[in-house]
Image (spheres, rainbow, N blue to C red):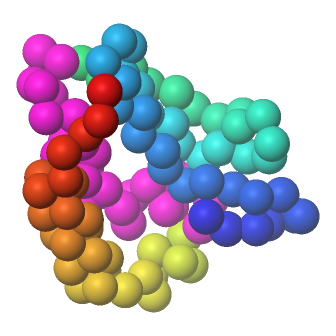
Amino acid sequence: MFVRDGLLRLIFRGDCFEKTPHYHYGLVGPHGEGERYNMDRIIIGDDLVGWTFRHLQEHLPAILVHVGFPGTADVFPYETMARVFQEAREFLNETPVAV
């Protein structure tokens, strides 16, 4: 997340819902205006969270540029991000989900 022009900007959000999973780019402000794309389960499969982590790891520089933060794309600590994503993924795989 970043603040620009006094508004909180969320770069990417993956909504890995069972019904109508989707993701957003460039959410701005309290109502979250931005681009929304549905996840295609035929292409992604059932591991929506895994796909979300892989998508961010593989495409974050392009995502940052796309949502208006090209300077950040040049200096972002990608090695740290990859390590944090790996740890988060391992945590999610080990933690049971309450239904």
Camera-side residue: 81 or 97? 97
Asked which quadrant contains residue 76, the reply is bottom left
Quadrant housing the N terminus:
bottom right
Question: Is 53 inside the magenta-drawn segment?
Answer: yes
Quadrant housing the C terminus:
top left
Question: Is 98 inside the magenta-drawn segment?
Answer: no
Coordinates of residue 3 in the picture (x, y in percent): 76, 67
The magenta stretch is 41-69
Q: Residue at x 46, y 74 (%)?
A: 73
Q: Horizontally, is 82 left or right of 15 in the view?
A: left
Is residue 54 at all visible to an observer of this figure?
no
- Please, which residue is most extreme toward the front here? 98
Is residue 25 at all visible to an observer of this figure?
yes
Coordinates of residue 68 in the picture (x, y in percent): 62, 59
Coordinates of residue 33 in the picture (x, y in percent): 72, 34
Camera-side residue: 74 or 92? 92
Asked which quadrant contains residue 5, the reply is bottom right
63 w.r.t. 37: above or below: below
Q: Horizontally, is 55 left or right of 35 in the view?
A: left
92 w.r.t. 22: above or below: below
53 w.r.t. 74: above or below: above
